[in-house]
Structures are given as C-alpha cells and as structure tokens.
Image (spheres, helix red, strand yellow):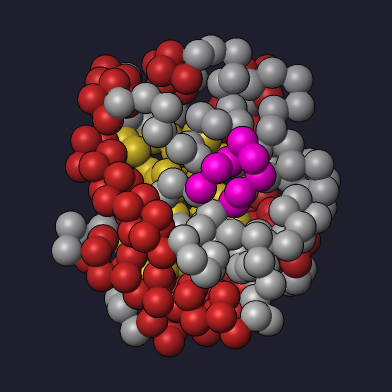
Amino acid sequence: MPHFAANLTMMFNEWSFLDRFKAAADAGFSAVEFLFPYEHSPDAVAKALQGAGLQQALFNMPPGDWAKGERGMAALVGREAEFKAGVATALTYAEATGVKRLHMMSGLVSNLDPAAMACYEANLRYAGEQLARHGLDLVIEPINGRNMPGYFLNDFDLAARLIGQAGLPNIKLQFDLYHCQIIHGDVTMRMRQAMPLIGHIQIASVPSRHEPDAEELNYPFLFDELDRLGYQGFVGCEYNPKAGTLEGLGWFREWSRTRS
C-alpha cells in the first residue's frame, strides 16, 4: 500500500507550522513533506518531527526569493553562487531531519535559452554530486504552466532526458500525477514508463487540486498500480483541502482501513 506523506505546506494550515507535525501524526500519517523549512531552525524542525514520531519524506532546496515570485535558481544564469549556498543550507536541514531526498526547483526562464539550459545542467550535476556525498537523492519535478507559468522544467520527457544526461544514479524524477495529467495526460502509461527513474510521487485531484477522491483521475486504480509496479517510496499529498484538512481525510481513512 502507498506510504502517504502529508504535505504540511498545503495541509494542516489550521495549525502553526511547527504544530502541524503532531496534527498530521494524530490524523494517522507516519510521514510528512513540505516546501521549505527555512523560516525555522534545523533543530526546531527536527524537534517537531521527532516529537511527532514522523519520517521526513521530502523538502525543497532554497528557491530564491519566493515572496517576490522566484521559483528556484537552478536555471538562472548569474545565480550560481547563491544556488550552491542553497545546496549547503539544504544539507544542514537534511542532516537534522534525516530526509533522504531533496527537490531542486529550476526557476522561471525559458528552457529554449541555451545559456539557461547549460546553467541548469551544470547545477543539476553539482547538486547531485553534493547530495551523493551524503547518501541523498536529488529529485526534479516538471510543473505545469497553468500553476506556474514560465517554469523552466515543464515537460516530463525533458526531465527524463536531463536525468539521463547527468548520469548520476541519485538524480531521480519527482512524479506529480497532478502535473503529469495537466501537461501530458495518459498518466498510467507515463508512470509505468518512468518508474525506473521515479524517486518520489505526489498526488492531487485534477483540475481543482483538492483531495484525491474525485474529478479526472481514478486514484484507487492508480494506488493499486503503484503496488503492481513495486513502488516503495513515499506518496506526497500535495493538495489544497477543499473544506478543512481533517474534514477532507475520508479518502485517507478509507484507504488505510481497507488496506490494513
């Protein structure tokens, strides 16, 4: 059965960030993910995580100035030193939390720009090598242009090509079924084809990005497909609760009950 991780950036917003860990554990989750921990010290995040008895599934490396609209730095020419400093910062939090994979955001720039592509490829390899020294995986995620217009990594085929070119076994694909459906469709076949590259999975309904219990995607089938494919990693619940986090967890309770 899938090992679900609550996304504490999007879920459990009824609590302050450090209190969300216990709230997620009380709701039945054994793992969590979030976008960024950097407003809190590594020790504070580790204490909240350990106090709730949770595993840390994933978080992102520093994205630049998020409040001003930046969405990563890996493809931004001229920001290489800041990117490398961000890798070091993320590794400090990784050591504190015990997380085994970090997500690298590319930034808002055209992937048709040769300079941006060269910058991304160099930073991808640098981050992959740094994380490998600590026994960690680096994951990259294609993001659809509706939610994030102008995002560099906006195609699953491009992501697979970049992973192959990097040639490092710890660089893997973050396969978000929500983004895949919007970008390409044909989610099941793409998931089957990409499975050897996948290091993390995320879910949400399409098109509304709510709980995975309605709309376009047949999540019971897809969860069973993950079992058939032998996927052993985390499934991050990166969705916006429709009417409150706890009120929307019927799908999670039902799935846990039928598979226990």
Decide which of 192, 163 is in the foreground and name it. 163
Q: Position of residue 57 (x, y in %)?
A: 38, 44
Which residue is painted at 58% across and 41% down in the image?
66
Give how far across and how far down residue 74 sits, in percent.
48, 64
Task: Using residue 20 as the reference point, say whether residue 149 is left or right of it.
Answer: right
Measured from the top left, where is residue 84 in percent x and y?
A: 33, 59
Residue at x 73%, y 62% (from the top left corner): 150
Q: Is residue 235 left or right of residue 242?
A: left
**Which range of residues does the magenta coloring cover?**
64-71
Q: Answer whether residue 210 is magenta in the image.
A: no
Q: Splitting the image into 4 quarters, where does residue 209 fall?
A: top right
Q: Give residue 3's quadrant in the image.
A: top left
* Residue at the image position 19 percent from the left and 60 percent from the top: 135
- Is residue 212 visible in the rendered image? The answer is yes
Q: Residue at x 44, y 46 (%)?
A: 62
The one nearer the camera, 234 or 255, is 234
**224, above or below 74, in the image:** above
